[in-house]
Amino acid sequence: MDASDVQALSGEYSRERLSEIKADAIKQNWDSGTFSLARERLIEALDRNLPSGMDTPEYSQAQAERASEWGLKAIQPLLDQHGLNPNDRIRDRLGVEVFKAELEAYAGADAELHGDTSWQAAPLAKASVLEDPATLPELFADFVRVTPKLAARTRESWKTYIDRAHKFFDSKPAARVTRKDVRAFADALLAGDKKAAPKGKPLAGKTVKDNYLAALSVVYKFAIDRERLKEDPTFKIKIQTEKTTIVGYSREEALAVLRASREPQSSRTRPEIVNVIRWAPWLATFTGARIGELLWLERKDIRFTQGIAYINIQAGADEGDARTVKTDSSTRTVPLHPAIINEGFLDYWRSLPEGARYLFPGDWSDKNGDRTKTPANKLRNWIKRQLPDADWQRLSPNHSFRHWLIAECRRVNIDGDYSRVLTGHEAKDVHGRYGPADIPTLYEAVKRIPAPDDWNNQTDAPQ
């Protein structure tokens, strides 16, 4: 706290007391003499038991100490309300100013009720003092407590972003962070400033915008919604981002990856990862599922209806289940393309050990229970090795399968609603929502996409 804080708090106290005193005065029909008497009694309390007629520094100091003691007792509820704990130097000054504010409140109430237009209220308190004093990490912790469905992985990454921002802002309360502070933080991340950026490496504009500033914005919006803060300093902070669009694999590229998945893997590759390499590309290619969604699939999520095998992509059912989906529309059922069945996937599924929970068993969960990061990263690196000449500025090793499927749906004129439900994109309306009962309909659409054995007749894919 500083001098402006003292002024702000004493001003707030004076306005509150002004309202209270006016209410009492109206109720009890006070005249101006009553107001004057109340002020005189306050002042007399400072002189009580002190030698009379004194005009020395020691006498004035004794009065100031009594005024401070009285004022601190009166202001304590406000200090508690704002979570403030001033040091001794500030407390002494604050107590005296609050005592003066009490006198001013009586004078103000008298003036307002008896027509004295010359009196002016105390200066307005600064919003930064009167807002919630919580820091960004404290606000984020409160946000997490009321957002039980926040994915563990998201929670941990956002916490990292918030903590870095808090450190960069020198641990000041969230209410005191300005747009200038946020702009400086963003610039530091882009420049690779060691105080802001991980390992002192420059971050891409998209990373700064979609990760760091997005996390800060969520916290500020939460605090504003709870009436704990009044302004969001991240609002309209513009970051130049690189315009990159992820594209799908060509048929030649997809075919190269699918063929490579059949080949024996290095003896140094863990068996669990071998299974991911063998089947995740096939499933991603012909179901449009995200790699993370596939890695969360449980053995029981392979189901059948009317003789058609399909996968059931769901979020975790309870707090202890860390499975996540990107959006509500990502929860879906997708039939397995004949190419996946003919490749022998169901044989793999049936061969899973008794008691195996996941479709891709493996002990690779991180501290938050997320079991997707390690195998997804290994699969990504493996795919890059299979396509050394690919344009990785535009392709995403694990995600371009989805774009490939979307392109194939267009190529064979599959209905847009079907394409959206296969890939878990938002339906245009209720008619675009499908469930297990619609698997036969979706299957008829999916099987129109040619299997890899037929691609040679339609592309220049190498033999």
Image (cartoon, rainbow, N blue to C red):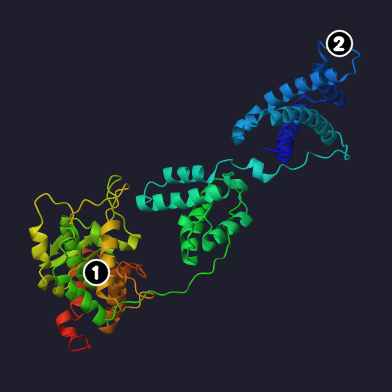
Alpha-carbon span between mark 2 and mark 1: 91 Å
Q: Which numbered tag is attached to residue 284?
A: 1
- Relative to the observer, which residue lies in front, 339 or 196? 196
Q: Give the residue type that dot 1 points to.
A: Ala
Above or below: residue 383 compared with residue 176? below
Q: Is residue 282 visible?
A: yes
Secondary element at tag 2: loop
Q: Where residue 188 appears, x then y in whole percent?
A: 55, 59
Q: Where residue 404 appears, x then y in whole percent?
A: 29, 76
Q: Is residue 414 visible?
A: no
Tell me the residue at 35%/60% (across/down): 326
Which quarter of the rendered picture does the C terminus lie within?
bottom left
Q: Where residue 10 appears, x then y in whole percent?
A: 73, 34
Q: Where residue 16 appears, x then y in whole percent?
A: 71, 34
Q: Are marks 2 and 1 in contact (CB under 8 Å)?
A: no
| Quadrant in which residue 410 is drawn | bottom left
Tell me the residue at 22%/58% (across/down): 297
- Relative to the observer, which residue lies in front, 177 or 275? 275
- Relative to the observer, which residue lies in front, 358 or 390? 390
How many numbered circles are shown?
2
Q: Give the residue type that dot 2 points to.
A: Pro
Q: Tell me if 278 is positioned left or right of 28 in this view.
A: left
Secondary element at tag 1: helix
Q: Which numbered tag is attached to residue 192?
A: none
Say few, some or many: other residues with alpha carbon within 10 Å of mark 2 (under 14 / 14 to 19 / 20 or more): few
Q: Which numbered tag is attached to residue 51?
A: 2
| Quadrant in which residue 35 is drawn | top right
Tell me the residue at 58%/54% (across/down): 232
The disc, 2 or 1, on the residue closer to the chain's N-terminal end is: 2
